[in-house]
Amino acid sequence: MALDKATVAKIATLARIKLPPSEQEHLAGELSTILTWIEQLGEVDTAGVEPMSSVAAMELPMRNDEVTDGGCREKILANAPDSAGGFFTVPKVVE
């Protein structure tokens, strides 16, 4: 599929990309090459290939769905610049 300068200008406008006219011809050639390569992918026979979500054949470990408070309040509050009574303290922003 060959793109011309007008099509590249329209694509740049839709993508809100400022593209000088001097670069449109060069970009049209590059985009045409990319689209030609993508068209070649359509020729590949994928009739017997199952859809997959990952190229790695593995299952993710599952954990029990239990509600907890995290159990690490002290570690979290140790990162805070200031804390009081087990909570973060922040500067007053509304007067």
Image (spheres, rainbow, N blue to C red):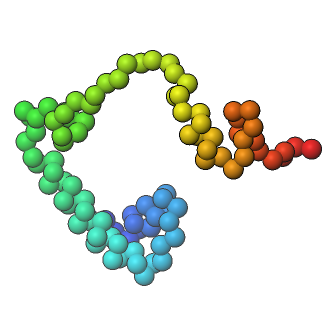
Q: Quadrant of residue 52?
A: top left
Task: Please identify the quadrant where the C terminus is shown.
Answer: top right
Residue drawn at (72%, 41%) of the image = 83
Camera-side residue of 75 and 5: 75
Kindly tell me whether residue 57 is visible in this rendering.
yes
Residue 85, given in percent of the width and then of the height, sits at 74, 32
Whether residue 36 sits left or right of residue 47 in the image: it is right
Residue drawn at (35%, 72%) of the image = 27
Q: Quadrant of residue 5?
A: bottom left
Kindly tell me whether residue 1 is visible in this rendering.
no
In the rendered view, tell whether residue 42 sits above or below residue 6.
Answer: above
Whether residue 24 sits left or right of residue 92 in the image: it is left
Residue 58, given in percent of the width and then of the height, sits at 19, 33
> From this viewpoint, which residue is outermost toward the right?
95
Q: Quadrant of residue 77?
A: top right
Residue 57, given in percent of the width and then of the height, sits at 16, 35
Task: Please identify the quadrant where the N terminus is shown.
Answer: bottom left
Residue 73, given in percent of the width and then of the height, sits at 59, 33
Q: How many marks?
A: 0
Camera-side residue of 41 and 78: 78
Whether residue 90 sits left or right of residue 67 in the image: it is right
